[in-house]
Image (tube, grey):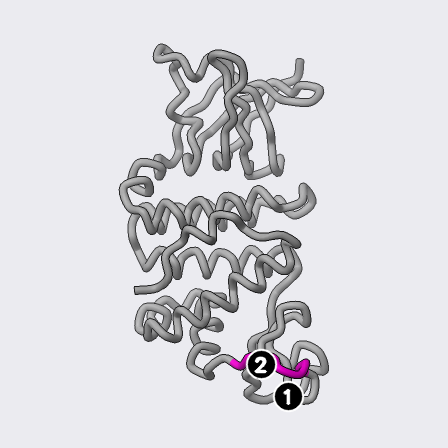
């Protein structure tokens, strides 16, 4: 059977039989991969701990008909332990890997892999508020998938200006003329936070008020779940900004 090697982020695992696991991974060059890791639930397993969610590993796999088989795994990033120590980091990481798992195979690109690795690394190190790291990831992952929201000109008619109505199904901010009746408005200051999150301007994000960060989080959650066409279950557990 042919073999291949790749870097991968572990997204989730399922038990198989008495000692095996099915591992779902987002790899750097092969997209999403589902593989059987044999014997990893035994205490004598050499690489079971390297195939846990939020871990980054260099894996060697046999190519199978329906499921590949993990032959070797070497740790590249042990983020799981540091993430699991903090509830806010853990729930944010779950929402991130759940979103990555929802990607279609055509969207699972090297850029998506690097974005997820960077997000998990930032969570493990506590570089910024966990919810802000998650929000930035969600905006960027949507953009990489071809669903970049508009936070400046009207998403429907391209009218320039400072618009304050956000409509997920229309692609972002819309002007008053295009906005459906009764659409909620968001503060201009929260719009600045949204732009900073997608641009990676962490100085502005970290300095934002709790109210603006919370408003931005609500917009991002609505937008991401609209385009994924179903809810992100882990988002219900994520704590709001504090």
Rendered location of residue 86, percent (x, y): 28, 46
Q: Is residue 184 magenta?
A: yes
Residues marked 1 and 2 touching at CB (< 8 Å): yes
- Between 150 and 183, the residue placed more toward the observer is 183
Marker disc for residue 94: none
Q: Please give the name of the residue rendered at 33% of the width and 70% of the height, measured from the top-left corner.
A: 203
Residue furthest to the front in view is 182
Q: Is residue 124 shown above or below 129?
A: above
Q: How many numbered discs sit on the rendered protein?
A: 2
Q: Is residue 84 shown above or below 45?
A: below
Marker disc for residue 176: 1
Q: Residues within 10 Å of mark 1 (few under 14, many from 20)?
A: few
Disc 2, SS? strand
Q: Which residues are magenta?
A: 179-185
Rendered location of residue 25, percent (x, y): 54, 34
Q: For the N terminus, which image quadrant?
A: top right
Disc 1, SS? loop
Residue 200 in which image quadrant: bottom left
Q: Is residue 69 magenta?
A: no
Predominant SS along the magenta part? loop
Q: For the C terminus, which image quadrant?
A: bottom left
- Between 227 and 79, the residue placed more toward the observer is 227
**Distance in Å between CA atoms under marks 1 and 2:** 7 Å
Write down the residue under mark 2.
165
Residue 192 in which image quadrant: bottom left
Sequence-earlier tag: 1 or 2: 2
Rendered location of residue 187, percent (x, y): 46, 82
Q: Please give the name of the residue rendered at 62% of the width and 21% of the height, measured from the top-left corner.
A: 68
């Amino acid at each position: 059977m042919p073999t291949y090697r790749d870097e991968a982020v572990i997204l989730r695992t399922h038990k198989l039989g008495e000692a095996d696991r099915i591992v779902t991974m987002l790899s750097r060059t092969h997209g999403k991969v589902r593989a059987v890791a044999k014997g990893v639930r035994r205490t004598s397993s050499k690489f079971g701990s390297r195939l846990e969610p939020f871990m980054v590993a260099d894996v060697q796999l046999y190519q199978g008909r329906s499921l590949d088989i993990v032959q070797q795994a070497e740790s590249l990033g042990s983020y799981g332990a540091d993430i699991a120590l903090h509830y806010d980091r853990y729930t944010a990481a779950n929402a991130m890997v759940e979103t990555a798992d929802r990607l279609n195979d055509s969207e699972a690109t090297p850029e998506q892999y690097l974005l997820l690795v960077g997000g998990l690394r930032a969570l493990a190190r506590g570089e910024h508020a966990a919810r802000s790291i998650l929000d930035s990831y969600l905006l960027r992952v949507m953009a990489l998938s071809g669903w970049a929201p508009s936070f400046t000109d009207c998403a429907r008619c391209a009218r320039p200006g400072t618009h304050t109505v956000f409509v997920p199904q229309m692609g972002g901010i819309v002007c008053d003329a295009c906005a459906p009746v009764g659409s909620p408005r968001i503060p201009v200051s929260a719009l600045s936070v949204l732009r900073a999150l997608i641009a990676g301007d962490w100085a502005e994000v970290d300095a934002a008020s709790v109210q603006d960060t919370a408003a931005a989080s609500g917009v991002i959650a609505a937008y991401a779940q609209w385009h994924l066409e179903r809810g992100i279950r882990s988002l219900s557990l994520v704590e709001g900004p504090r």
